[in-house]
């Protein structure tokens, strides 16, 4: 892949109303569940980023017909549960952790052999967290060094239902178990230590599966899924991704004079921790036109530039904003006083080690930051950060976009070594930001 370096200059106020692309988590799931329902599922607002396109290609290789009918509009003709065919080549999942982990679950209960590969970042991420529980259903899974891709999954011919207590807060592990349980007889049970995003549960219920959630010990949740349901094709409208919205939201908060509206953003309560955190920091963030679209809560989010205060963030919020920490660290860098973030070990195994990547990005741009095993302490600049340094995204879209946002509110230009990874989740990111008035160095190479 060609690298795309850019230089971000301090920006004037950001103003306007935007739509960000469709939710990545829901887009993956819509394609997968559509491929399991016999007949035609239509999806609108699908995220057409590289991660989701990798899932679309994988579903085709597994026997579904997947077609793009217009911008964000897709049709999936499923063959029915249990009817996946063995792919004739390895499935290259690119950068997509959600894609590969959920699909490992899906194929584990089908009598087919599937090989998964990924890019350099995905090939460094832990996979035993899904492979180990999936062996319970009878699948045999071989990982490089017992942990990494490539993975070879020999699915079970007579799958058994699973009963698994997930040791880490992970919607991907939870969903992989549920997907395996779909093609097993009997009840599959997953217990999670803290509630994580419930898009799989909501969408499976919409497709007609019998699925119930109850409270478990110490604030956790237990989900019961009745196996071998008849999934019914659906029309799915994917809300805009709050994880993508987080970048213009923080950009507007830290760029003086800004006022930005993000339309139709998903505000699922298990995803909206970033809004809570920013409000606790004094951010002027309002939700308007709250409504429900396709079984998911959505709203327009209105943000105005604000003087932010440092925060000691309660780690309990982490599960509902796990992907938004890189850009929250940027907000903390512009806030008044110190911020402490703890309980974030999981950030070390995302598309990059996000604690190390953001500690390096902030300190290279003059921000005082301490890195701990499970978090960061950031000393805010009470306004723009000094800037003048380079951000290395380490193949991680969210580090690249967090660096870009920091550059808008810096005294000196900030260089981003490579914006190419942004294509995984937010195609058109730079154009969207420029549409709001974000500046970019005239000398910088252009993204296309
Ligand atoms: C996701 C779950 C989270 C999140 C990822 C998307 C999902 O990962 O970080 O971007 O769609 O289920 P974990 O399950 O590893 O926490």
Image (tube, rainbow, N blue to C red):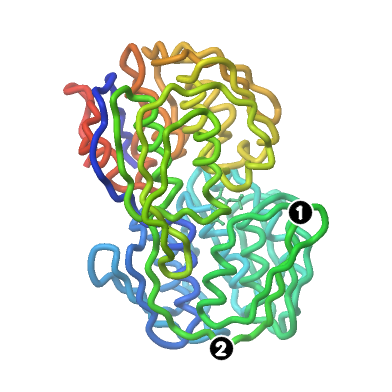
- SS class of the residue under badge 1? helix
Task: Pick the residue in front: 183 or 91.
Answer: 183
Looking at the rendered image, the disc whose residue lies closer to the viewer, 2 or 1, is: 1
Query: Count the marks: how many?
Result: 2
Residue 291: horizontal and vertical position, in percent? 41, 62
Q: Residue furthest left?
A: 442
Quadrant of image for the C terminus? top left
**Could you tell me how far apart the alpha carbons at marks 2 and 1 are, in whole angstroms?**
32 Å
Residue 217 in view of the camera: yes
Q: Is residue 330 left or right of residue 4?
A: right
Residue extending farthest right: 217
Snapshot quadrant of residue 13 = top left
Instruction: Depth check: give the residue in front, 304 or 218.
Output: 304
Q: Position of residue 399 (x, y in %)?
A: 46, 33
Compared across the picture, whether 107 is left or right of 50 comes to right
Identify the residue shown where x is 60% and y is 65%. 104
Q: Position of residue 373 (x, y in %)?
A: 70, 28
Query: Residue 247 lies in what quarter of the image?
Result: top left
Which residue is painted at 62% across and 79% down in the image?
Answer: 110
Is mark 2 in CB contact (under 8 Å) with mark 1?
no
- Marked residue nearer the N-terminal end (2 or 1): 1
For disc 1, the marked residue is 219
Q: Quadrant of the N terminus?
A: top left
Q: Which residue is mark 2?
A: 230
């Amino acid at each position: 892949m060609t690298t795309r370096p850019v230089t971000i200059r301090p920006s004037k106020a950001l103003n306007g109303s935007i739509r960000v692309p469709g939710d990545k988590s829901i887009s993956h799931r819509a394609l997968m569940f559509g491929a399991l329902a016999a007949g035609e599922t239509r999806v609108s607002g699908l995220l057409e980023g590289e991660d989701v396109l990798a899932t679309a290609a994988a579903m085709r290789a597994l026997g579904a017909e997947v077609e793009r009918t217009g911008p964000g509009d897709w049709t999936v003709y499923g063959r029915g549960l249990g009817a996946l065919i063995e792919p004739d080549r390895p499935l290259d999942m690119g950068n997509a952790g959600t894609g590969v982990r959920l699909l490992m679950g899906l194929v584990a209960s089908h009598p087919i052999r599937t090989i998964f590969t990924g890019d350099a970042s995905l090939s460094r991420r832990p996979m035993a967290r899904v492979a180990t529980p999936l062996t319970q259903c009878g699948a045999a899974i071989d990982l490089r060094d017992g942990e990494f891709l490539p993975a070879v999954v020999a699915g079970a011919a007579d799958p058994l239902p699973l009963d698994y207590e997930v040791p880490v807060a992970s919607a991907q592990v939870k969903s992989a178990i549920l997907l395996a349980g779909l093609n097993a007889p009997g009840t599959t049970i997953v217990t999670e230590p803290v509630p994580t995003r419930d898009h799989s549960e909501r969408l499976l219920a919409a497709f007609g599966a019998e699925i119930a959630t109850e409270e478990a010990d110490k604030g956790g949740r237990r989900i019961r899924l009745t196996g071998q349901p008849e999934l019914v094709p659906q029309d799915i409208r994917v809300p805009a991704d709050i994880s993508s919205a987080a970048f213009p939201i923080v950009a507007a908060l830290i760029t003086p004079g800004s006022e930005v509206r993000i339309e139709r953003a998903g505000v699922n309560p298990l995803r909206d921790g970033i809004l809570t955190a920013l409000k606790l920091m004094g951010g002027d963030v309002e939700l308007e036109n709250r409504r429900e679209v396709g079984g998911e809560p959505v709203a327009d989010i209105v943000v105005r530039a604000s003087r932010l205060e440092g925060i000691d963030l309660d780690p309990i919020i982490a599960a509902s904003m796990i992907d938004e920490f890189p850009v929250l660290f940027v907000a903390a860098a512009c806030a008044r006083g110190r911020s402490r973030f703890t309980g974030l070990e999981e950030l070390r195994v995302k598309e990059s080690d996000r604690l190390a990547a953001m500690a390096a990005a902030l300190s290279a741009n003059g921000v005082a930051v301490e890195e701990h095993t499970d978090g960061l302490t950031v000393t805010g600049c009470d306004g723009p950060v000094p800037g003048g340094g380079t951000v290395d995204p380490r193949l991680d879209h969210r580090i690249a976009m967090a660096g870009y946002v920091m550059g808008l509110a810096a005294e000196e230009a900030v260089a981003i070594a490579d914006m190419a990874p942004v294509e995984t989740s937010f195609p058109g990111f730079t154009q969207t930001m420029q549409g709001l008035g974000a500046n970019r160095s005239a000398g910088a190479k252009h993204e296309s």
